[in-house]
Image: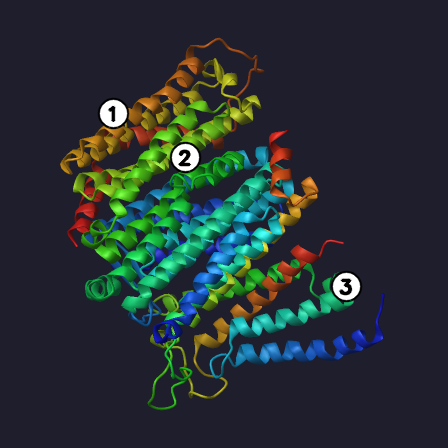
Amino acid sequence: MAVVEHLPVLGVAGLLAMAFVIPLLPEGRLPAMLALAGSVWAALAQAGTLFAVLAEGTLVYHVGSWPPPWGIEVRVDLLGAVVAFVVAAVGLFIAVYALGSVPLEIPGPARRWYFCLQTLLSAGMLGLINSGDLFNIFVFLEITSLAAYALVAVEDKLESLEASFKYLVLGSVGSGLVLLGIAMIYMVTGHLNLEALAGAVPAAAEAFPRNLTAGLSVFVVGIAAKSALFPLHVWLPDAHANAPSPASALLSGLVLKTSLLVLVRVTFNVLGPAFAQATPLPMVLFWLSTGGILLGSLFAIAQRDLKRMLAYSSVAQVAYIFFGLSVFTHNAVTGAFLHIVYHAMLKASLFMAAGLIIARTGQRRLGALSGIGRHMPLTTAAFAIAAVGMIGLPPTGGFLSKWYLALGSVDAAKPLYAFVIVFSSLLNAMYFLPLIISAFFGPALQTLAPGREGPLTMVLPTLLLSVVTLLIGIVPHFPLNALAAAAAALLGR
Amino acid sequence: MAPLVDRVYYFTSLALFAIGFHTLVTNNNLIKKIMGLNIMDTAVFLFFVATGFVRGGRAPLVTGPGVYTNPLPPALILTGIVIAVSTTGFALALAIRIYHHAGTLNVDELTRRIRGG
Amino acid sequence: MRDTVLDITVRILFPVILLYGLFVVIHGHLSPGGGFTGGAIMGAAMLLLGLAKGSTAAHRLLTESLSTAIDSGGALLYLASGLTGLLLGSRFLANKAAGFPVGTPGQLLSSGLIWIIGLAVGAKVLATMWSLFTALAGEE
């Protein structure tokens, strides 16, 4: 345990160090290489942490050797370890992809800043997941958000600047509400440390139930704005469609999930499922997420732009996770956690494939994709694998998470919920299947000059990530067992 | 009256929050939206600091026995203010870039410019 | 346009404010204030210079690359001092627990790591305020 216990801190510290060194460097290959080195380092550190947590249980680390309540606590439980590892690993795939993609998409002087922001974003996300107290979670949430706003704007086009501003306004309202929620919880418990809070909540719930409920509701609205839960999703399609492709993959795949993890921390770790179930939270989350699932899919069907379609699909997919968290049965919560993991990987590879197609054809219209499978077989295959996972067909991971969500709904004796899942899968199929079919079998609408599909650094991570997603869907023991145990532990308290 | 007076900071922060939100939602000018955001943030900071306030308490410098105010919320809010400053700085820089490209700070005008191609 | 009163006032005030900011930074562990407050005071001195003499003149003193270097240097110094605690066999950011000399409380050279971290934070805040100023007002 001796060296391993430092790993979560060292991973984040390494990324932060890289993020601060990159602005000092001259333009060229060096910033990209350092960003990659940071991602490799973080992925290794999180892999080590994951092994330690799987073997020995929750990892607790007191920064500066000060125990709480004085010191800052790093606390990596099973859920945190799995999600942090997935975030670091998918981040590594995206960092490799960015090596090829950034020179194609971003004008020269801004490239360095892209890599700086990408590293800072990863540091923020990993710090957030590893933090053991609410205020540090808030600080890292803000680091993540600021880096995300800036990543959208990094191309310096009017559309992306406007999208970034919209994202910033809704994100800042969200973070203000999150802080207000933290203040309300702190007010009646006197703690910010997650463990201490969990101990203090029962007494506080006895004495001041309304304060806690008010805090929770303000908090949920804030997280809903940050994670784009319907109807606060309006910023997402613009921001994710106008960002550079690797940034879209980061934002859609990872950033949405980390703010969702904050919601899990507050509802499950701090307030406890018993308290949360007694509030109107499950009902509110259910209706909003149902709205998000159905309307997000319908809007995705109506899109004509490849990246906008994927962005609306994210609105629907994030709603699945909220949906699972609203049910409070073991299977449903497991399904929600699985969907965090699988959607992170699937949406990242979809955006990466979309970036390749756009870079090769110069077209963003869905109609232009007809017959693209003949020109770009590898990319289209990666896209198809990830899209099938998104629809939720067996044997992909997407099927597994939806299966658990549906099982959980039946466990909770709410068959209506299971119907929503099945019906929405049909909607997902409606916008992904025709696309795949026309890409492989449709008439080629454009004649592309013969040549490679794209730089190897872009094709390889895209294909590899979708294949890995397929594999861990077929052999799901790693994320499934750990996440099921995490769900049991969180529901048990 | 007493409960009202005791909670004056909470009511003030509520009012500030409403003012900020109203400014944010009803104005079409990007700079005014940023101002609204700042007022909202201030409301949250006031609320958080007020949770640590003890009536009749002294500044939390350990010099002897007595009632102290809680030093933690101000320390945390200092961090919160730094975050708000960075967000505001970034938002203003964005507004400047948008003005460079579009020559306007009006949201409707911007939407027209983007949708109209 | 040059204004004699403004010019001379700033010439006198600028070093005083800068020195006062530095004083607040290095006395952070003894008195109210610290890295952030002192850094903000030093940043205010730079802002005063930039507003009074025009940002071109102020940029001669604190160029963009120097400001970036101070900014990143401050953050890296913070990280490095955190890592020394870890390398000395204790934990990240450990101070007394890692065996840093704490000195006599009340003396200027005391409190081990806090002193260095204060400097790092001060440098970072100074550079951040300056780069915010140049980003928002520096375009001419």
The residue labelled by disc 3 is C54
What is the CA distance from the residue labelled 1 to the residue labelled 2? 19 Å
Q: Helix or strand or loop: what does disc 2 sit on?
A: helix
Q: How many marks?
A: 3
Q: Considering the numbered disc 1 on the image, is that residue within a helix, a strand or a loop? A: loop
Across and down, in percent, residue B11 comes to 42, 66
Which of the marked residues, 1 or 2, is nearer the chain's N terminus? Answer: 2
At 27% across and 67% down in the image, what residue appears?
Answer: A189
Asked if labels 1 and 2 share a chain, the reply is yes
Q: Which residue in the structure is indicated by mark 2? A: A348
Mark 3 vs mark 1, CA separation in Å:
66 Å
Could you say which quadrant of the image residue A395 lies in?
top left
Badge number at residue A385: none
Who's the residue at 21% across and 55% down the image?
A: A275
Q: Nearer the viewer, residue A149 or C117?
A: A149
How far across and down, in percent of the image, does residue A413 sit? 14, 36
Q: Amino acid at mark 3?
A: Gly
**On what subunit does the disc labeled 1 rest?**
A
Q: Is residue B115 above or below residue A28?
A: above
Labelled pair 2, 3 in contact (Cβ < 8 Å):
no
The residue that disc 1 covers is: A395
Query: Given the current orientation, which residue lies at the most extreme bottom position?
Result: B64
Q: Amino acid at mark 2?
A: Ala
Cα–Cα span, label 2 and label 3: 47 Å
